[in-house]
Amino acid sequence: METKKTRGFEIVSEYLESGVTLPVRQTSMSAGYDLAAAKDVLIKKSETALVPTGVKAYFPADEVLMIYIRSSLATKRSVTLANSVGVIDADYYGNSENEGHIFLPLRNFGNSDVLIKKGERVAQGIFQKYFVVDNDAALKTHRRGGFGSTG
């Protein structure tokens, strides 16, 4: 008997054989699932780079996956998310452009280059329920692309 999937992570096709591991919570009281870099990425000082995680997330339509930087990366290495908080919508999973691959736009605001190593935990994802207003009418009915595809 097949178990119905509700919420979780999967490795994207491109990274199936690369040794990427699925995000996990580090303690029983942790809210966030740690997201790690799928490959080494050099972020030059004062620049932003997209760091692949090699994973995608599936969850109910009335939830969102919020992405936050790990505090140690920000305080010890002067790296943060370029957009402050990432928002992964349920329809990002399985999109035609990149399968729903979660990328992290990391900004180096320090005075020296920072090397993010493959397997290094850099962000955390927290699943949250959200609400819409009465008479909500979303403008688009289907996502047509990947990262930043809604305009």
Image: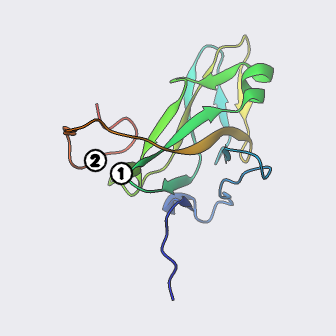
The residue carrying mark 2 is 143
Relative depth, front residue between 25 and 36: 25
Question: Residue type at mark 1?
Answer: Asp
Relative depth, front residue between 8 and 131: 131
Q: CA distance from mark 1 to mark 2?
A: 6 Å
From the top left corner, tell me how far across and down residue 48 is, in percent: 56, 23
Report whether 42 appears left or right of 92.
Answer: right
- Confirm or deny contact between disc 1 and disc 2 (CB under 8 A): yes
Residue at image position (64%, 48%) is 38
* Local crowd size for mark 2, using a 10 Å CA cut-off: few (<14), some (14–19), many (≥20): some
Residue 89 vertical position relative to residue 45 in the rendered view, above or below: below
From the top left corner, tell me how far across and down residue 79 is, in percent: 68, 23
* Local crowd size for mark 1, using a 10 Å CA cut-off: few (<14), some (14–19), many (≥20): many
Question: Residue type at mark 2?
Answer: Arg
From the top left corner, tell me how far across and down residue 116 is, in percent: 71, 35
The colour scheme of the drawn protein is: rainbow
Q: Identify the image quadrant of residue 114.
A: top right
Residue at image position (48%, 74%) is 4
* SS of the residue under disc 2: loop
Residue lying at the far front of the rendered structure = 134
